[in-house]
Image (cartoon, helix red, strand yellow):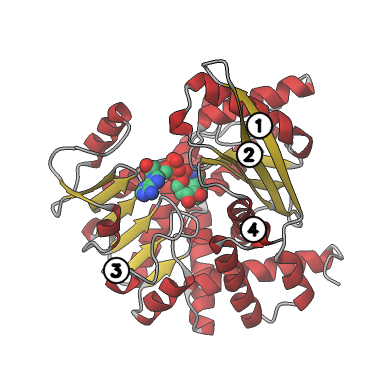
Protein backbone atom coordinates (compact mmCIF):
# COMPACT_ATOMS: atom_id res chain seq x y z
CA UNK A 1 0.00 0.00 0.00
CA UNK A 2 2.92 2.35 0.75
CA UNK A 3 3.89 2.37 -2.96
CA UNK A 4 0.37 3.55 -3.74
CA UNK A 5 -0.37 6.03 -0.99
CA UNK A 6 3.09 7.07 0.23
CA UNK A 7 4.06 9.73 -2.36
CA UNK A 8 4.03 13.45 -1.50
CA UNK A 9 1.32 14.37 -4.04
CA UNK A 10 -0.94 11.55 -2.83
CA UNK A 11 -0.51 12.58 0.82
CA UNK A 12 -1.04 16.23 -0.06
CA UNK A 13 -4.19 15.50 -2.07
CA UNK A 14 -5.76 13.31 0.61
CA UNK A 15 -5.16 15.99 3.25
CA UNK A 16 -7.11 18.42 1.06
CA UNK A 17 -9.88 15.82 0.70
CA UNK A 18 -9.96 15.25 4.47
CA UNK A 19 -10.09 18.98 5.28
CA UNK A 20 -12.84 19.68 2.75
CA UNK A 21 -14.67 16.49 3.76
CA UNK A 22 -14.75 17.65 7.38
CA UNK A 23 -16.08 21.05 6.32
CA UNK A 24 -18.97 19.64 4.27
CA UNK A 25 -19.68 16.90 6.78
CA UNK A 26 -18.93 14.17 4.26
CA UNK A 27 -20.03 10.68 5.21
CA UNK A 28 -16.98 8.83 6.64
CA UNK A 29 -17.77 5.89 4.35
CA UNK A 30 -17.68 8.10 1.25
CA UNK A 31 -14.41 9.63 2.43
CA UNK A 32 -12.89 6.21 3.06
CA UNK A 33 -13.88 5.04 -0.44
CA UNK A 34 -12.50 8.13 -2.16
CA UNK A 35 -9.13 7.83 -0.43
CA UNK A 36 -8.22 4.79 -2.55
CA UNK A 37 -8.39 4.12 -6.29
CA UNK A 38 -10.78 1.53 -7.59
CA UNK A 39 -8.22 -0.26 -9.72
CA UNK A 40 -4.48 0.01 -10.43
CA UNK A 41 -2.70 -1.65 -13.27
CA UNK A 42 1.09 -1.96 -13.55
CA UNK A 43 2.47 -3.22 -16.86
CA UNK A 44 5.86 -4.03 -18.36
CA UNK A 45 6.42 -2.31 -21.68
CA UNK A 46 9.16 -4.03 -23.72
CA UNK A 47 10.48 -1.84 -26.52
CA UNK A 48 12.85 -2.78 -29.32
CA UNK A 49 15.27 0.17 -29.39
CA UNK A 50 16.88 1.47 -32.59
CA UNK A 51 20.14 -0.38 -31.79
CA UNK A 52 18.32 -3.74 -31.63
CA UNK A 53 18.35 -4.09 -27.81
CA UNK A 54 15.10 -4.69 -25.93
CA UNK A 55 14.46 -2.33 -23.01
CA UNK A 56 11.58 -2.80 -20.57
CA UNK A 57 9.79 0.28 -19.20
CA UNK A 58 7.19 0.35 -16.42
CA UNK A 59 3.72 1.66 -17.24
CA UNK A 60 0.68 2.45 -15.08
CA UNK A 61 -3.04 3.06 -15.45
CA UNK A 62 -4.91 3.95 -12.28
CA UNK A 63 -8.71 4.16 -12.31
CA UNK A 64 -9.85 6.10 -9.29
CA UNK A 65 -13.63 6.45 -9.47
CA UNK A 66 -16.40 6.00 -12.03
CA UNK A 67 -19.50 7.04 -10.14
CA UNK A 68 -20.23 9.95 -12.50
CA UNK A 69 -19.32 8.22 -15.77
CA UNK A 70 -16.46 6.50 -17.65
CA UNK A 71 -12.94 6.92 -16.28
CA UNK A 72 -11.05 9.81 -17.89
CA UNK A 73 -7.50 11.11 -17.53
CA UNK A 74 -4.19 11.78 -19.23
CA UNK A 75 -1.08 9.72 -19.93
CA UNK A 76 2.25 11.07 -18.67
CA UNK A 77 5.70 10.15 -20.01
CA UNK A 78 8.32 11.28 -17.50
CA UNK A 79 11.35 9.66 -15.90
CA UNK A 80 10.00 10.30 -12.38
CA UNK A 81 6.52 8.80 -12.89
CA UNK A 82 5.62 6.30 -10.17
CA UNK A 83 2.51 4.51 -8.96
CA UNK A 84 1.73 6.94 -6.16
CA UNK A 85 2.02 10.00 -8.39
CA UNK A 86 -0.25 8.45 -11.03
CA UNK A 87 -2.76 7.45 -8.33
CA UNK A 88 -2.81 10.98 -6.90
CA UNK A 89 -3.31 12.46 -10.38
CA UNK A 90 -6.12 9.94 -11.03
CA UNK A 91 -7.93 11.09 -7.89
CA UNK A 92 -7.51 14.74 -8.93
CA UNK A 93 -9.27 13.84 -12.20
CA UNK A 94 -12.26 12.46 -10.24
CA UNK A 95 -12.48 15.67 -8.21
CA UNK A 96 -11.96 17.92 -11.25
CA UNK A 97 -14.61 16.18 -13.33
CA UNK A 98 -17.07 16.36 -10.48
CA UNK A 99 -16.36 20.06 -9.93
CA UNK A 100 -16.76 20.82 -13.66
CA UNK A 101 -20.09 19.00 -13.64
CA UNK A 102 -18.92 16.50 -16.29
CA UNK A 103 -20.40 12.98 -16.60
CA UNK A 104 -16.94 11.43 -16.16
CA UNK A 105 -14.91 9.61 -13.53
CA UNK A 106 -11.19 9.93 -12.87
CA UNK A 107 -8.12 8.02 -14.05
CA UNK A 108 -4.49 8.65 -15.00
CA UNK A 109 -1.69 6.73 -16.68
CA UNK A 110 2.00 7.01 -17.19
CA UNK A 111 5.21 5.41 -18.30
CA UNK A 112 8.49 5.88 -16.45
CA UNK A 113 10.57 7.14 -19.35
CA UNK A 114 12.31 10.30 -20.50
CA UNK A 115 10.64 10.80 -23.89
CA UNK A 116 13.38 13.22 -25.00
CA UNK A 117 15.88 10.35 -24.94
CA UNK A 118 13.86 8.16 -27.35
CA UNK A 119 13.71 8.41 -31.14
CA UNK A 120 10.31 8.87 -32.80
CA UNK A 121 10.27 5.18 -33.81
CA UNK A 122 11.07 4.09 -30.24
CA UNK A 123 8.33 6.35 -28.86
CA UNK A 124 5.83 4.86 -31.30
CA UNK A 125 6.86 1.31 -30.30
CA UNK A 126 6.55 2.21 -26.62
CA UNK A 127 3.13 3.83 -27.08
CA UNK A 128 1.71 0.96 -29.13
CA UNK A 129 2.92 -1.69 -26.65
CA UNK A 130 1.69 0.30 -23.64
CA UNK A 131 -1.72 0.74 -25.29
CA UNK A 132 -1.90 -2.95 -26.05
CA UNK A 133 -1.09 -3.83 -22.41
CA UNK A 134 -3.80 -1.55 -20.99
CA UNK A 135 -6.35 -2.15 -23.80
CA UNK A 136 -8.59 -4.56 -21.82
CA UNK A 137 -9.22 -1.70 -19.39
CA UNK A 138 -9.77 1.28 -21.72
CA UNK A 139 -12.40 2.10 -24.37
CA UNK A 140 -14.84 4.87 -25.34
CA UNK A 141 -17.37 3.70 -22.74
CA UNK A 142 -14.84 2.61 -20.12
CA UNK A 143 -11.76 4.75 -19.77
CA UNK A 144 -10.61 7.49 -22.14
CA UNK A 145 -6.94 8.62 -22.04
CA UNK A 146 -5.62 12.03 -23.18
CA UNK A 147 -2.24 13.80 -23.38
CA UNK A 148 -0.37 15.00 -20.28
CA UNK A 149 3.28 15.84 -19.59
CA UNK A 150 5.55 14.35 -22.27
CA UNK A 151 2.74 13.13 -24.55
CA UNK A 152 0.85 14.91 -27.33
CA UNK A 153 -1.67 14.51 -30.15
CA UNK A 154 0.72 12.17 -32.02
CA UNK A 155 0.84 9.88 -28.96
CA UNK A 156 -2.97 9.82 -28.97
CA UNK A 157 -3.04 9.03 -32.71
CA UNK A 158 -0.84 5.94 -32.10
CA UNK A 159 -3.03 4.89 -29.16
CA UNK A 160 -6.19 5.27 -31.24
CA UNK A 161 -4.69 3.26 -34.08
CA UNK A 162 -3.44 0.41 -31.84
CA UNK A 163 -6.74 0.15 -29.98
CA UNK A 164 -8.73 0.27 -33.24
CA UNK A 165 -6.52 -2.44 -34.84
CA UNK A 166 -7.20 -4.73 -31.88
CA UNK A 167 -10.96 -4.01 -32.02
CA UNK A 168 -11.22 -4.52 -35.79
CA UNK A 169 -12.81 -1.13 -36.46
CA UNK A 170 -12.03 2.55 -35.96
CA UNK A 171 -12.75 3.71 -32.42
CA UNK A 172 -12.08 7.43 -32.41
CA UNK A 173 -13.72 7.94 -29.01
CA UNK A 174 -11.08 5.88 -27.17
CA UNK A 175 -8.77 8.89 -26.66
CA UNK A 176 -9.11 12.67 -26.67
CA UNK A 177 -6.53 15.30 -27.54
CA UNK A 178 -5.93 13.58 -30.88
CA UNK A 179 -5.27 15.40 -34.18
CA UNK A 180 -8.30 17.12 -35.74
CA UNK A 181 -7.83 15.07 -38.94
CA UNK A 182 -8.73 11.86 -37.11
CA UNK A 183 -11.58 12.98 -34.89
CA UNK A 184 -9.95 15.56 -32.63
CA UNK A 185 -11.77 18.72 -31.60
CA UNK A 186 -10.94 22.20 -32.78
CA UNK A 187 -9.66 24.15 -29.81
CA UNK A 188 -8.48 21.15 -27.76
CA UNK A 189 -4.78 21.93 -28.05
CA UNK A 190 -5.16 25.39 -26.53
CA UNK A 191 -7.97 24.45 -24.13
CA UNK A 192 -6.08 24.00 -20.85
CA UNK A 193 -4.08 27.22 -21.33
CA UNK A 194 -7.22 29.07 -22.37
CA UNK A 195 -9.00 27.80 -19.25
CA UNK A 196 -6.08 29.08 -17.14
CA UNK A 197 -6.60 32.54 -18.65
CA UNK A 198 -10.41 32.46 -18.17
CA UNK A 199 -9.82 31.55 -14.51
CA UNK A 200 -7.24 34.36 -14.26
CA UNK A 201 -9.76 36.88 -15.65
CA UNK A 202 -12.30 35.84 -13.02
CA UNK A 203 -9.77 36.07 -10.16
CA UNK A 204 -8.65 39.52 -11.38
CA UNK A 205 -12.27 40.65 -11.53
CA UNK A 206 -12.54 39.91 -7.79
CA UNK A 207 -9.57 42.24 -7.20
CA UNK A 208 -11.08 44.88 -9.51
CA UNK A 209 -8.37 44.44 -12.14
CA UNK A 210 -8.45 43.70 -15.84
CA UNK A 211 -6.17 41.30 -17.64
CA UNK A 212 -4.98 44.04 -20.00
CA UNK A 213 -3.39 45.87 -17.03
CA UNK A 214 -1.75 42.80 -15.54
CA UNK A 215 1.71 41.26 -15.42
CA UNK A 216 1.97 37.46 -15.54
CA UNK A 217 4.78 34.96 -14.90
CA UNK A 218 4.33 31.47 -16.32
CA UNK A 219 6.36 28.39 -15.43
CA UNK A 220 6.36 25.72 -18.17
CA UNK A 221 6.06 26.46 -21.88
CA UNK A 222 4.43 23.22 -22.99
CA UNK A 223 0.85 22.41 -23.89
CA UNK A 224 -0.53 24.32 -20.91
CA UNK A 225 2.00 27.11 -20.31
CA UNK A 226 2.54 28.07 -23.94
CA UNK A 227 -1.17 28.45 -24.69
CA UNK A 228 -1.76 30.30 -21.42
CA UNK A 229 0.99 32.70 -22.50
CA UNK A 230 -0.43 33.04 -26.02
CA UNK A 231 -3.97 33.69 -24.76
CA UNK A 232 -2.86 36.06 -22.00
CA UNK A 233 -0.67 37.99 -24.45
CA UNK A 234 -3.53 38.15 -26.98
CA UNK A 235 -5.76 39.66 -24.28
CA UNK A 236 -3.19 42.39 -23.59
CA UNK A 237 -1.50 41.02 -20.46
CA UNK A 238 2.22 41.67 -20.07
CA UNK A 239 3.87 38.24 -19.82
CA UNK A 240 7.04 39.27 -17.97
CA UNK A 241 8.52 35.83 -17.30
CA UNK A 242 8.30 32.31 -18.74
CA UNK A 243 10.37 29.18 -18.27
CA UNK A 244 10.74 25.55 -19.24
CA UNK A 245 13.10 22.70 -18.43
CA UNK A 246 15.98 24.71 -20.00
CA UNK A 247 15.53 27.69 -17.63
CA UNK A 248 13.64 30.98 -17.65
CA UNK A 249 13.34 34.38 -19.34
CA UNK A 250 12.48 37.76 -17.81
CA UNK A 251 11.64 41.11 -19.37
CA UNK A 252 9.87 43.67 -17.22
CA UNK A 253 8.44 45.33 -20.35
CA UNK A 254 6.86 42.03 -21.41
CA UNK A 255 8.04 39.20 -23.67
CA UNK A 256 6.77 39.03 -27.25
CA UNK A 257 4.96 35.70 -26.90
CA UNK A 258 4.03 35.38 -30.57
CA UNK A 259 7.74 35.51 -31.44
CA UNK A 260 8.70 33.23 -28.55
CA UNK A 261 6.17 30.61 -29.67
CA UNK A 262 7.71 30.65 -33.17
CA UNK A 263 11.20 30.42 -31.63
CA UNK A 264 10.25 27.43 -29.46
CA UNK A 265 8.65 25.65 -32.41
CA UNK A 266 12.06 25.67 -34.06
CA UNK A 267 14.47 25.39 -31.09
CA UNK A 268 12.22 23.29 -28.80
CA UNK A 269 13.17 25.29 -25.65
CA UNK A 270 13.00 28.94 -24.51
CA UNK A 271 16.74 29.10 -23.74
CA UNK A 272 18.71 31.92 -25.44
CA UNK A 273 15.62 33.76 -26.72
CA UNK A 274 16.81 37.36 -27.33
CA UNK A 275 15.40 40.47 -25.65
CA UNK A 276 15.10 38.88 -22.22
CA UNK A 277 17.42 38.18 -19.32
CA UNK A 278 18.05 34.65 -18.19
CA UNK A 279 16.53 33.57 -14.87
CA UNK A 280 16.23 30.19 -13.16
CA UNK A 281 12.97 28.34 -12.54
CA UNK A 282 13.39 29.06 -8.83
CA UNK A 283 13.70 32.81 -9.52
CA UNK A 284 10.57 32.76 -11.68
CA UNK A 285 8.44 31.63 -8.73
CA UNK A 286 9.54 34.70 -6.75
CA UNK A 287 9.43 37.22 -9.61
CA UNK A 288 7.57 40.54 -9.38
CA UNK A 289 4.27 39.90 -11.22
CA UNK A 290 0.56 40.25 -10.44
CA UNK A 291 -0.20 36.67 -11.45
CA UNK A 292 1.93 33.53 -11.15
CA UNK A 293 0.83 30.55 -13.23
CA UNK A 294 2.82 27.38 -12.49
CA UNK A 295 2.19 25.20 -15.56
CA UNK A 296 4.92 22.54 -15.35
CA UNK A 297 5.32 20.02 -12.55
CA UNK A 298 4.14 19.47 -8.97
CA UNK A 299 5.59 20.78 -5.71
CA UNK A 300 7.33 23.88 -7.13
CA UNK A 301 5.81 26.28 -4.58
CA UNK A 302 6.90 24.94 -1.21
CA UNK A 303 7.72 25.93 2.36
CA UNK A 304 11.12 27.18 1.20
CA UNK A 305 9.88 29.81 -1.27
CA UNK A 306 6.19 30.52 -0.55
CA UNK A 307 6.91 33.45 1.77
CA UNK A 308 8.87 35.15 -1.04
CA UNK A 309 6.13 34.78 -3.70
CA UNK A 310 5.20 38.31 -4.81
CA UNK A 311 2.16 37.53 -6.96
CA UNK A 312 -1.24 38.33 -5.46
CA UNK A 313 -2.90 35.63 -7.56
CA UNK A 314 -1.67 32.10 -8.29
CA UNK A 315 -3.45 30.15 -11.02
CA UNK A 316 -2.47 26.48 -10.95
CA UNK A 317 -2.12 25.34 -14.55
CA UNK A 318 -0.14 22.31 -13.36
CA UNK A 319 -1.54 19.61 -11.12
CA UNK A 320 -0.37 19.90 -7.52
CA UNK A 321 2.23 22.69 -7.92
CA UNK A 322 1.70 23.98 -4.35
CA UNK A 323 2.57 21.92 -1.27
CA UNK A 324 0.38 21.94 1.82
CA UNK A 325 2.93 23.95 3.83
CA UNK A 326 3.14 26.55 1.05
CA UNK A 327 -0.64 26.76 0.92
CA UNK A 328 -0.78 27.78 4.58
CA UNK A 329 1.86 30.49 4.04
CA UNK A 330 0.05 31.81 0.95
CA UNK A 331 -3.30 31.84 2.76
CA UNK A 332 -1.80 33.85 5.60
CA UNK A 333 -0.50 36.35 3.00
CA UNK A 334 -4.01 36.50 1.50
CA UNK A 335 -2.78 35.36 -1.90
CA UNK A 336 -5.71 34.15 -4.03
CA UNK A 337 -4.81 30.60 -5.13
CA UNK A 338 -7.04 29.28 -7.92
CA UNK A 339 -6.57 25.53 -7.36
CA UNK A 340 -5.60 23.04 -10.04
CA UNK A 341 -8.94 21.22 -10.23
CA UNK A 342 -10.53 24.52 -11.24
CA UNK A 343 -7.72 26.37 -13.02
CA UNK A 344 -6.62 23.58 -15.37
CA UNK A 345 -10.07 22.04 -15.86
CA UNK A 346 -10.26 23.52 -19.38
CA UNK A 347 -8.35 20.55 -20.77
CA UNK A 348 -10.78 17.90 -19.63
CA UNK A 349 -13.79 20.08 -20.42
CA UNK A 350 -12.77 20.26 -24.08
CA UNK A 351 -11.75 16.58 -23.97
CA UNK A 352 -15.33 15.93 -22.93
CA UNK A 353 -16.54 18.08 -25.86
CA UNK A 354 -14.27 16.05 -28.17
CA UNK A 355 -15.63 12.75 -26.87
CA UNK A 356 -19.21 14.00 -27.34
CA UNK A 357 -18.40 15.04 -30.93
CA UNK A 358 -16.79 11.64 -31.62
CA UNK A 359 -19.70 9.58 -30.37
CA UNK A 360 -22.25 11.76 -32.18
CA UNK A 361 -20.12 12.19 -35.37
CA UNK A 362 -21.01 15.87 -35.43
CA UNK A 363 -18.22 18.42 -35.14
CA UNK A 364 -18.32 21.94 -33.73
CA UNK A 365 -16.61 25.18 -34.79
CA UNK A 366 -13.72 26.54 -32.73
CA UNK A 367 -15.88 29.46 -31.58
CA UNK A 368 -18.52 27.06 -30.25
CA UNK A 369 -15.85 25.16 -28.33
CA UNK A 370 -14.32 28.32 -26.86
CA UNK A 371 -17.66 29.85 -25.89
CA UNK A 372 -18.85 26.67 -24.21
CA UNK A 373 -15.52 26.32 -22.41
CA UNK A 374 -15.65 29.91 -21.12
CA UNK A 375 -19.16 29.31 -19.81
CA UNK A 376 -18.08 26.19 -17.87
CA UNK A 377 -14.96 27.80 -16.36
CA UNK A 378 -16.77 31.02 -15.39
CA UNK A 379 -19.66 29.09 -13.84
CA UNK A 380 -17.35 26.75 -11.93
CA UNK A 381 -15.28 29.70 -10.72
CA UNK A 382 -18.38 31.52 -9.45
CA UNK A 383 -19.57 28.39 -7.68
CA UNK A 384 -16.22 27.93 -5.92
CA UNK A 385 -15.87 31.63 -5.07
CA UNK A 386 -19.37 31.73 -3.52
CA UNK A 387 -18.60 28.60 -1.47
CA UNK A 388 -15.32 30.06 -0.25
CA UNK A 389 -17.02 33.33 0.78
CA UNK A 390 -19.85 31.49 2.50
CA UNK A 391 -17.59 29.17 4.51
CA UNK A 392 -14.64 31.58 4.83
CA UNK A 393 -12.19 29.02 3.43
CA UNK A 394 -9.56 29.03 0.69
CA UNK A 395 -10.57 28.43 -2.90
CA UNK A 396 -8.78 25.07 -2.70
CA UNK A 397 -10.96 23.85 0.16
CA UNK A 398 -14.01 25.37 -1.52
CA UNK A 399 -13.33 23.62 -4.86
CA UNK A 400 -12.79 20.28 -3.16
CA UNK A 401 -15.86 20.75 -0.93
CA UNK A 402 -18.06 21.52 -3.96
CA UNK A 403 -16.69 18.51 -5.80
CA UNK A 404 -17.13 16.13 -2.86
CA UNK A 405 -20.76 17.14 -2.32
CA UNK A 406 -21.64 16.23 -5.92
CA UNK A 407 -19.77 12.94 -5.67
CA UNK A 408 -21.43 12.06 -2.38
CA UNK A 409 -24.91 12.70 -3.80
CA UNK A 410 -24.14 10.51 -6.82
CA UNK A 411 -22.64 7.74 -4.69
CA UNK A 412 -25.69 7.73 -2.43
CA UNK A 413 -28.07 7.60 -5.41
CA UNK A 414 -26.15 4.66 -6.84
CA UNK A 415 -26.12 2.87 -3.50
CA UNK A 416 -22.33 3.13 -3.22
CA UNK A 417 -22.31 5.01 0.08
CA UNK A 418 -23.40 2.72 2.85
P1 LIG B 1 4.12 19.38 -21.46
O1 LIG B 1 5.00 18.19 -21.45
O2 LIG B 1 3.47 19.79 -22.73
O3 LIG B 1 4.95 20.64 -20.93
C1 LIG B 1 5.63 20.65 -19.72
C2 LIG B 1 6.48 21.90 -19.64
O4 LIG B 1 7.15 21.94 -18.39
C3 LIG B 1 7.57 21.98 -20.73
O5 LIG B 1 7.71 23.31 -21.15
C4 LIG B 1 8.82 21.52 -19.97
O6 LIG B 1 10.02 22.02 -20.54
C5 LIG B 1 8.55 22.12 -18.61
N1 LIG B 1 9.32 21.47 -17.54
C6 LIG B 1 9.60 20.15 -17.40
N2 LIG B 1 10.35 19.96 -16.32
C7 LIG B 1 10.53 21.17 -15.76
C8 LIG B 1 11.22 21.62 -14.63
N3 LIG B 1 11.88 20.78 -13.84
N4 LIG B 1 11.18 22.94 -14.35
C9 LIG B 1 10.49 23.79 -15.15
N5 LIG B 1 9.82 23.43 -16.24
C10 LIG B 1 9.86 22.13 -16.53
O7 LIG B 1 3.04 19.15 -20.31
P2 LIG B 1 1.64 19.88 -20.14
O8 LIG B 1 0.61 19.06 -20.79
O9 LIG B 1 1.80 21.32 -20.47
O10 LIG B 1 1.40 19.70 -18.57
C11 LIG B 1 1.90 20.62 -17.60
C12 LIG B 1 1.13 20.47 -16.31
O11 LIG B 1 -0.25 20.73 -16.56
C13 LIG B 1 1.15 19.08 -15.67
O12 LIG B 1 1.08 19.22 -14.27
C14 LIG B 1 -0.11 18.44 -16.18
O13 LIG B 1 -0.57 17.37 -15.37
C15 LIG B 1 -1.05 19.62 -16.13
N6 LIG B 1 -2.24 19.52 -16.99
C16 LIG B 1 -2.14 19.32 -18.33
C17 LIG B 1 -3.29 19.26 -19.10
C18 LIG B 1 -3.23 19.11 -20.60
O14 LIG B 1 -4.31 19.20 -21.22
N7 LIG B 1 -2.11 18.93 -21.21
C19 LIG B 1 -4.54 19.39 -18.49
C20 LIG B 1 -4.61 19.61 -17.12
C21 LIG B 1 -3.44 19.67 -16.38
Give the answer, above or below, for where 193 lies relative to 268: below
Residue 367 percent location from the top left of the image: 46, 39
**Which of the image's four quarters has the C terminus?**
bottom right
Residue carrying label 3: 309
Mark whose residue sits in front, 2 or 3: 2
Q: Disc 1, disc 2: CB below 8 Å?
A: yes
Q: Which quadrant of the figure has residue 170?
A: top right
Give the answer, above or below, for where 237 lies relative to 18: above
Of label 2 and label 3, which has the lower sequence position? 2
Residue carrying label 4: 91
Q: Disc 4, disc 3: CB below 8 Å?
A: no
- The CA span between labels 1 and 2 is 6 Å
Whether residue 187 is visible, yes or no, is no
- The CA span between labels 1 and 3 is 41 Å
Pick whichever, 108 or 379, lies toward us.
108
- The CA span between labels 2 and 4 is 20 Å
Give the answer, above or below, for where 361 lies relative to 286: above
Whether residue 393 is visible, yes or no, is yes
Residue carrying label 1: 45
Q: Disc 2, disc 3: CB below 8 Å?
A: no
Residue 331 percent location from the top left of the image: 40, 78
Of label 1 and label 3, which has the lower sequence position? 1
Residue at figure coordinates x 70%, y 66% from the top left: 35
Residue 262 percent location from the top left of the image: 27, 31
Mark whose residue sits in front, 1 or 3: 1
Near mark 4 (Cα within 10 A), the count class, few <14, some 14-19 or many ≥20, is many
Residue at figure coordinates x 29%, y 47% from the top left: 243
Q: Secondary structure at mark 2?
A: strand
Q: Which quadrant of the figure has residue 159?
A: top right
Q: Which mark is residue 58?
A: 2
Near mark 3 (Cα within 10 A), the count class, few <14, some 14-19 or many ≥20, is many
Q: Is residue 417 left or right of residue 273?
A: right
Amino acid sequence: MEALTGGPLYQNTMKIVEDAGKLVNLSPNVLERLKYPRRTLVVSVPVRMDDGRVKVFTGYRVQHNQTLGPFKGGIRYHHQVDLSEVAALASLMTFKNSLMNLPLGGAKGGVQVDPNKLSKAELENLTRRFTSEISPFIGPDRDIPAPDVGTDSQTMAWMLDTYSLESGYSQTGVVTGKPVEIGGSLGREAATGLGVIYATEKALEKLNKRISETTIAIQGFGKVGMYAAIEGYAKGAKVVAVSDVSGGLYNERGINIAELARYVKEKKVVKDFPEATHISNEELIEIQADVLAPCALEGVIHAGNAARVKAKIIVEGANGPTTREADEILNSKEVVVVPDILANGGGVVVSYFEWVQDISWLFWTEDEVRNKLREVIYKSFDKVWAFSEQHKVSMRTAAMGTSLLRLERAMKLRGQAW
